[in-house]
């Protein structure tokens, strides 16, 4: 790779983020009130949501640029290491800028850099609104989607033969489709994320800044990095079907649980797909104890892990690198479960103890 190609690859994530930002600011949007409140005023925060337009807009622009041969469809795969370095640099710069400009939150600068100092930073000028968490999630998702498209293009161009396409790996194609579905599902249901852990609890520091701008788009696609150059291993197609079914099962658990929680928060007595909410409550709080949330306290985490495992299995179960993504999810979500349970115990007190008696399992029903 020449120095010029490295420089262009290095700044590719910056350009993608810039385009996504312009589309986010310029395209029509839905204004939605979330669950989090402003740290100073206590007012419920409002968000500008249009990922359902920005993501397909960026994907379409990418396809057009490749079609007119201005930017090869394989570009992000070809410069993947330079792109990862550029995304990492962008994440570090963002973290330093947003953290160091604010008053100290703890005695340790490293703790502040990791966790952040501001919970919900927003910048508003006139009718325009840019929310840091919305922007980070949007840029990360767009970059992950374009990476998936680029790896898919590389695999197809490398192994497709009009007369004999037996070298194309259906499992790899399925992994690309599942990862794409994962991204589009999150962006389509963008408003439901406003009630999740990241928006209600976490601050904006290295964990979210670097995580969304660099780790999310490059690490989540590690299975594609590890297998795009490999031909069809010749395994039975029924296995690929099984892996897709595992992914669908994971999606039902994750999305179903999140939707049930969302509708319960906005309308506690409303049915969810025929499920009448059952709760325990005290004078201040109510907790769901049936439906998805009656199976385990974090059933959505199990769904996320199953989806990651399905992508790894489809890409190539015998390639060790493909398991980095699901193993990361296991480490992340099991640790988050412990932290979230501790936070809930402090928030709900005796009600949480009662809830634990009703819903015994933490993540995996009948196992853990």
Image (cartoon, grey):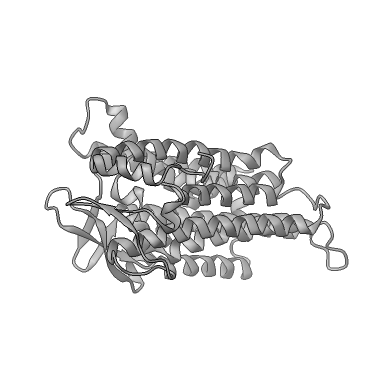
- Residue 97 seen: no
Q: Position of residue 146 (x, y in %)?
A: 55, 58
- The image shows residue 361, relative to residue 188, as above or below, that is above
Q: Which of 212/303 is in front?
A: 303
Q: Can residue 273 be seen in this snapshot?
A: yes
Residue sticking out furthest to the right = 163
Q: Nearer the viewer, residue 190 or 90?
A: 190
Q: What count of labels does the image hold? A: 0
Relative vertical location of residue 119 with respect to residue 111 in this rendering, above or below: below
Q: Is residue 223 left or right of residue 115?
A: right
Residue 319 place in picture, x, y as percent: 71, 40
Direction from residue 7 to residue 320 in the image, left or right: right
Question: Which residue is the extreme one toward the bottom?
Answer: 28
Quarter of the picture holding the N terminus: top right
- Pinpoint residue 244: horizontal percent, then vertical percent: 66, 58
Q: Residue at x 17, y 48 (%)?
A: 39
- Is 282 situated left or right of 185 in this image? left
Q: Is residue 290 above or below residue 330?
A: below
Foreground pick, 342 / 243: 342
Residue at x-position 43% and y-position 70%: 274
Q: Which residue is drawn at the image coordinates 51% and 42% (left, top)? A: 329
Image side of residue 233 versus residue 178, left or right: right
Where in the figure is residue 64, as x and y percent of width and height? 57, 70
Which residue is situated farthest in the left direction here?
41
Residue at (36%, 42%) from the top-left corner? 356
Figure quadrant of residue 357: top left
């Amino acid at each position: 790779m020449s120095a010029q190609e490295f420089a262009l690859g290095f700044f590719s994530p910056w350009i993608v983020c810039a385009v996504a930002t312009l589309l986010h600011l310029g395209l029509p949007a839905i204004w939605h009130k979330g669950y989090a409140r402003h740290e100073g005023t206590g007012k419920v925060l409002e968000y500008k949501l249009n990922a359902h337009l920005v993501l397909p807009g960026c994907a379409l622009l990418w396809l057009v640029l490749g079609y007119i041969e201005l930017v090869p469809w394989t570009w992000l795969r070809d410069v993947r290491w330079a792109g990862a370095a550029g995304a990492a640099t962008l994440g570090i710069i963002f973290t330093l800028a947003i953290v160091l400009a604010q008053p100290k939150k703890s005695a340790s600068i490293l703790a502040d850099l990791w966790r952040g100092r501001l919970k919900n930073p927003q910048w508003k000028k006139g009718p325009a609104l840019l929310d840091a968490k919305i922007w980070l999630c949007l840029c990360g998702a767009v970059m992950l989607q374009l990476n998936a498209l680029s790896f898919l293009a590389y695999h197809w161009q490398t192994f497709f033969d009009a007369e004999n396409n037996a070298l194309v790996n259906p499992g790899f194609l399925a992994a690309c489709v599942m990862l794409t579905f994962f991204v589009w599902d999150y962006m389509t249901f963008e408003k439901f994320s406003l009630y999740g852990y990241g928006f209600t609890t976490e601050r904006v520091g290295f964990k979210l800044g670097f995580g969304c701008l660099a780790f999310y788009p490059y690490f989540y696609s590690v299975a594609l990095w590890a297998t795009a150059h490999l031909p069809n291993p010749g395994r039975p197609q029924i296995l690929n079907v099984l892996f897709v079914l595992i992914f669908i099962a994971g999606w039902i658990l994750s999305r179903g649980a999140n939707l049930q929680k969302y509708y319960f928060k906005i309308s506690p007595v409303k049915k969810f797909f025929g499920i009448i909410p059952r709760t325990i409550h005290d004078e201040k709080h109510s907790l769901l104890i049936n439906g998805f949330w009656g199976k385990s306290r974090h059933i959505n985490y199990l769904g996320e892990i199953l989806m990651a495992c399905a992508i790894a299995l489809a890409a190539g179960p015998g390639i060790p690198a493909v398991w980095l993504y699901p193993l990361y999810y296991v480490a992340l979500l099991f640790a988050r479960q412990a932290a979230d349970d501790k936070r809930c115990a402090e928030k709900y007190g005796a009600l949480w103890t009662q809830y634990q008696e009703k819903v015994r399992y933490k993540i995996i029903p009948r196992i853990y």
